[in-house]
């Protein structure tokens, strides 16, 4: 890498997900325009496909098992309807 020059690609995260026993992603549920960041199909280059075990957002917690995204917890004050309205990707409801 040359200082001050643009580096193509995301970079750096591959060594974090290859061979990891558990990958947890913590992020905002929506972008600054109010659009879902939890996409049905990824639009950016992937660091690793199918490596995330847990996704924690400001709205909810999801677990991934056998390629299925499962809603397991709502953050305080958040409703199921709010998560459904703000999540582009399909998920199964596994709330207790």
Image (tube, helix red, strand yellow):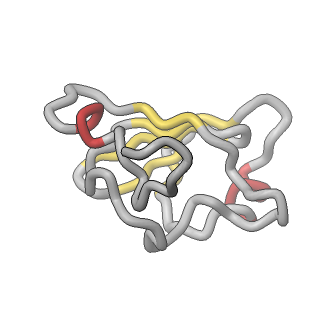
Q: Residue furthest left?
A: 19
Q: How many marks?
A: 0
Residue 46 falls in image quadrant? bottom left
**Between 55 and 71, the one nearer to me in the picture:** 55
- Which part of the image, by quadrant, shows the C terminus? top right
Residue at x 72%, y 33% (from the top left corner)? 75
Residue 88 falls in image quadrant? bottom right
The location of residue 52, given as percent across then percent down, is 35, 43
The location of residue 16, given as percent across then percent down, is 29, 32
Residue at x 18%, y 38% (from the top left corner)? 18
Q: Left of 35 or right of it: where is 73?
A: left
Q: Left of 82 or right of it: where is 53?
A: left
Residue at x 42%, y 52% (from the top left corner)? 10
**Between 60 and 27, the one nearer to me in the picture:** 27
Give above or below for 41 relative to 7. Answer: below
- Which part of the image, by quadrant, shows the N terminus? top left
Residue at x 35%, y 39% (from the top left corner)? 12
Residue 67 appearing in the image: yes
The location of residue 58, given as percent across then percent down, is 72, 38
Residue 72 appearing in the image: no
């Amino acid at each position: 890498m040359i200082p001050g020059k643009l580096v193509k690609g995301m970079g750096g995260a591959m060594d974090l997900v290859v061979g990891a026993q558990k990958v947890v992603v913590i992020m905002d549920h929506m972008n600054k325009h109010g659009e879902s960041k939890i996409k049905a199909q990824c639009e950016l280059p992937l660091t690793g496909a199918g490596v995330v075990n847990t996704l924690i957002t400001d709205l909810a917690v999801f677990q991934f098992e056998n390629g299925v995204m499962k809603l397991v917890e709502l953050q305080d004050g958040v409703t199921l309807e709010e998560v459904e309205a703000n999540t582009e990707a399909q998920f199964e409801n596994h709330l207790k």
